[in-house]
Image (cartoon, helix red, strand yellow):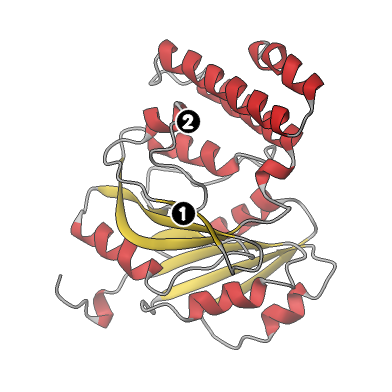
């Protein structure tokens, strides 16, 4: 692909919500500054942090960094504040404890420019331990097409979490459900995916830091999020009844095995009745 002229470089918005992130946020911000693609804005929303998150942010003096703060309202509310203020033609998310590999923005944007009908571009996700010293897992997504059915069926072919670059379409609304504390990215993707094209690149686009704050550390919160997503999907006319039933089955299985690994036998034994009642 020929080199893009500066005047033709689309503005990319990187969305970052931060809560008590003083330990890792400097590394996250630096990973954006180190990108091989330079026409970006980083919108950071401080979600009522009580530590030194704000002072860590203020150590960076780059005009492309835009800072907002709010009283503690949750990650979805923080991301929504960023989404309402973004100026880019595309956006992606970066949690305050994760990193973008140096070519993350450029590789995804190049794919989006070469496939004009693509609305979502994903890539390889590398999961590391909390110190980033050990690689735990690597996810590569080769799916190509409308991602709706794959998302609903929870088959893992096109979804890890905050790794999509999303082309902003004028007829769509990009907002997170602020009543969900777990599974919020899945809910957003399902709500905007119908009829759109998902594709991916081979390169790493996200380094995900696995920590005690991950979704699997709060299984009740995850279960509640899944139930709300299932309730939403059941009202979708473009999803077949068979896929809705399969989603319910997959959620029950995921939660049953998750509780079982924690030796939480009561919740493992009763999750079927809680999910089936939705």
Question: Where residue 254 appears, x then y in whole percent?
Answer: 60, 28
Q: Residue at coordinates 42% horizontally, 12% vertically from top-left?
A: 242
Question: Where residue 39 appears, x then y in whole percent?
Answer: 39, 77
Report helix, strand or loop for mark 2. Answer: loop
* Residue 186, above or below 58: above
Report helix, strand or loop for mark 1. Answer: loop
Q: Left or right? Give the position of 112 relative to 276.
A: left
Q: Nearer the viewer, residue 210 or 50?
A: 210
The image quarter containing residue 239 is: top left
Question: Where residue 253 appears, x then y in whole percent?
Answer: 59, 22
- Quadrant of the rendering where the N terminus is positioned: bottom left
Q: Residue at coordinates 45% horizontally, 42% vertically from top-left?
A: 159
Residue 134 seen: yes
- Quadrant of the rendering where the C terminus is positioned: top right
Numbered label attached to residue 102: none
Numbered label attached to residue 163: 1
Q: Nearer the viewer, residue 85 or 185?
A: 185
Tell me how many marks there are: 2
Labels 1 and 2: the sequence-earlier one: 2
Q: Nearer the viewer, residue 125 or 30?
A: 125
Local crowd at mark 1 within 10 Å, few (<14), some, or many (≥20)?
many
The image quarter containing residue 274 is: top right
Q: Residue at coordinates 29% horizontally, 74% vertically from top-left?
A: 9
Local crowd at mark 2 within 10 Å, few (<14), some, or many (≥20)?
some
* Residue 232, above or below 87: above
Q: Residue at coordinates 69% horizontally, 56% vertically from top-left?
A: 211
The residue carrying mark 2 is 154
Residue 87 seen: no
Cα gap from disc 1 to disc 2, whole angstroms: 16 Å
């Amino acid at each position: 692909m020929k080199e893009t002229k500066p005047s033709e470089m689309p503005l990319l918005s990187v969305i970052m919500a931060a809560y008590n992130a003083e330990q890792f946020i400097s590394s996250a911000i630096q990973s954006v500054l180190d990108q091989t693609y330079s026409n970006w804005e980083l919108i950071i929303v401080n979600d009522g942090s009580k530590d030194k998150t704000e002072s860590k942010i203020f150590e960076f003096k780059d005009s492309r960094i835009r800072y907002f703060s709010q009283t503690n309202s949750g990650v979805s509310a923080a991301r929504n504040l960023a989404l309402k203020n973004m100026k880019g033609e595309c956006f992606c998310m970066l949690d305050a404890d994760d990193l973008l590999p140096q070519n993350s923005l450029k590789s995804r944007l190049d794919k989006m420019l070469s496939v004009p009908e693509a609305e979502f571009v994903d890539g390889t996700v590398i999961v590391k331990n909390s110190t980033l010293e050990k690689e735990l897992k690597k996810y590569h997504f080769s799916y190509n097409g409308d991602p709706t059915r794959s998302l609903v069926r929870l088959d893992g072919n096109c979804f890890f979490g905050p790794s999509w670059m999303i082309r902003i379409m004028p007829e769509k609304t990009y907002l997170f459900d602020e009543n969900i504390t777990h599974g919020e990215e899945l809910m957003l993707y399902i709500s905007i995916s119908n009829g759109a094209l998902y594709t991916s690149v081979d390169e790493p686009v996200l380094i995900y830091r696995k920590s005690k704050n991950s979704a699997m550390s709060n299984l009740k919160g995850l279960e509640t999020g899944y139930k709300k997503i299932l309730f939403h999907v059941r009202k979708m006319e473009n999803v077949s009844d068979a896929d809705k039933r399969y989603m319910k089955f997959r959620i029950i299985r995921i939660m049953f095995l998750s509780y079982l690994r924690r030796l939480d036998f009561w919740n493992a034994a009763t999750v079927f009745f809680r999910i089936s009642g939705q």
